[in-house]
Image: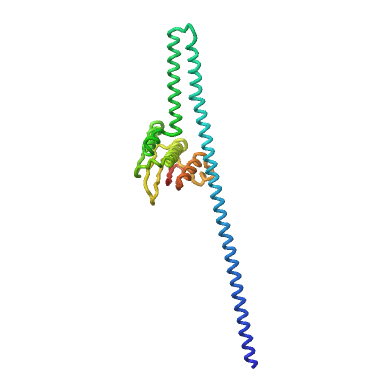
Amino acid sequence: MGTNSVADNDVMVVIIYTSVAFLMMAVVLVLFYHFSRKKIVQHELEKRDLKISHQQDLLKATIITQEEERKRIAQDLHDDISSKLNIVSLNTHLLTTSGLSEIELSEITSNIIELTGKALENSRRIAHDLLPPVLEKFGLHAAIEELCHEFKTAKQAEIHFENKLPAFHVTEEEMQLQVFRVLQELLNNSFRHGKATVINICFEERDGRRTCLYSDNGRGFDPSEIQNKKGLGMKNIESRIAILNGNLNFDSAVNNGVQVSFTF
């Protein structure tokens, strides 16, 4: 009888310890899940905040770029158009002066014609900067060819452009404009900061996405430094790539040029 009682007590002890052990394991698992979930949620929130912060930076850069563009256009209109038209207006009033000789009339008329011609030329240039006519009429390929030709002529540089993609669809106007502006900014950076003499631009398809490969033989830069010193031009490029839902990659080293790829 005593033996059975001891055995029963042992069984009870085992059951109690086992139950306690399972209970502790359950508590540990619940706590582990709780804290793991909390860390995951915290990590997701940090990622979201980082993404929002990045989007805010891009939006800010876009707004600043637009404001700078407006200021530049306003300055161009004032310096190149308004000033010349004011002189044309003054010369036109001079024509109403009585007693002008034939030589004076000829000089004033020639001056009016010359200034009017320059004002028209400058207005075309400003319109071209806003929206290149070639891009609007003939598409991205032709616009980039013209852009390369302009930089070749002005900078005495060697620029190679190759397009392995099929023709761009006429309805993709916004995409074509953004890609054009990105290349315009990259070319400006290559010459202004990199002092490049050779540039390569290639459009091709990679992993099912349209990709632009861009490289130059300029001064290059330290990628770790550029992350902390992004200028307006760089932020402008990033904001345009974001509009295209594309990816942007930079690779460079000091005195080793720049290699850029972006999808669109």
Residue at image position (64%, 93%) is: 1
In the depicted structure, whether residue 138 falls above or below residue 97: below
Residue 218 shows in the view: no
Residue 167 shows in the view: yes
Q: How far across and how far down the image is residue 20, in percent?
A: 62, 76
In the drawing, does residue 202 fall left or right of residue 8?
A: left
Residue at image position (45%, 17%) is: 112
In the drawing, does residue 215 fall left or right of residue 44?
A: left
Q: How far across and how far down the image is residue 149, in percent?
A: 37, 34
Q: How far across and how far down the image is residue 99, in percent?
A: 48, 6
Front-most of residues 1 and 157: 1
Residue at image position (43%, 8%) is: 102
Residue at image position (40%, 41%) is: 171
**Residue lying furthest top in this view?**
99
Q: How far across and how far down the image is residue 151, in percent?
A: 40, 34
- How many labels sit on residues? 0
In the depicted structure, whether residue 131 falls above or below residue 87: below
